[in-house]
């Protein structure tokens, strides 16, 4: 009996030690995301992703964010199957303010009317409006976008976008 208890103690100690090891170098760690109160801040640019994309303060940046995918579907066989704004035609929740990656973001999800299970998107606008991030899920393919000084769709940016979308409730469950 003592041997069994000693073995279990050693096993539990080793298990606890193994669980506290940092991830290997190069492993991306999900940033901590917390939802913040403040409905007034959340609707600063609009009450849906479609309204936010058309907001006068962000319209030019939104067009730059999506580039050729803003108005034309799959330009040159690349990009998304429909223009980017169509991924936000139907609201998939109210805009929310969240903190991720050391900044406050206005985050909102949307989807293509009649195709929410396959064509959904999430839009993040940094609190000052200077940075926009987005992910569009286009029938099984995810497209990431970043606009703002010093920002690009790096793996770290993608992880930030994904963590924010999960905090909002994640992509449509039927995917």
Image (cartoon, rainbow, N blue to C red):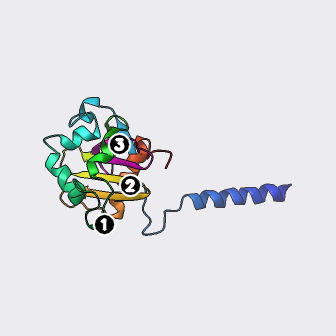
Residue depth check, mark 3 versus mark 1: number of the one nearer the observer: 1
- The residue singled out by tag 2 in the image is 138
> Does residue 147 appear in this view?
no
Position of residue 135 in the picture relative to residue 18 (left or right): left
Q: Position of residue 23 (x, y in %)?
A: 49, 64
Outermost residue toward the bottom?
Answer: 25
- Mark toward the start of the polypeptide (3 vs 2): 3
Residue 118 lies in the magenta-colored region? yes
How far, Cα to Cα, is label 3 from label 1? 26 Å
Mark 3 secondary-structure assignment: strand
Mark 2 secondary-structure assignment: strand
Residue depth check, mark 2 versus mark 1: number of the one nearer the observer: 1
Q: Which residues are magenta?
A: 100-123
Magenta stretch, overall SS? strand
- The residue singled out by tag 1 in the image is 77
Q: Position of residue 3 (x, y in %)?
A: 83, 59
* Residue at 33%, 32% in the rendered image: 37
Cβ atoms under marks 3 and 1 closer than 8 Å = no
Position of residue 132 in the picture relative to residue 99 (left or right): left
- The residue singled out by tag 3 in the image is 109
């Amino acid at each position: 009996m003592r041997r069994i208890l000693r073995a279990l103690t050693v096993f539990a100690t080793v298990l606890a030690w193994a669980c506290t090891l940092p991830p290997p170098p190069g492993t991306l760690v999900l940033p901590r995301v917390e939802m913040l109160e403040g409905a007034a801040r959340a609707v600063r640019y609009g009450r849906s992703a479609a309204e936010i994309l058309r907001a006068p303060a962000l319209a030019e940046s939104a067009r730059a964010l999506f580039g050729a995918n803003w108005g034309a579907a799959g330009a040159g066989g690349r990009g998304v199957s429909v223009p980017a704004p169509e991924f936000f035609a139907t609201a998939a929740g109210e805009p929310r303010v969240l903190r991720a990656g050391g900044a406050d973001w206005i985050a909102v999800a949307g989807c293509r009317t009649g195709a929410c299970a396959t064509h959904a998107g999430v839009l993040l606008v940094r609190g000052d409006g200077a940075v926009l991030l987005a992910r569009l899920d286009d029938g099984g393919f995810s497209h990431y976008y970043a606009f703002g000084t010093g920002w690009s769709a790096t793996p770290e940016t993608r992880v930030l976008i994904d963590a924010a979308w999960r905090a909002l409730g994640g992509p449509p469950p039927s995917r």
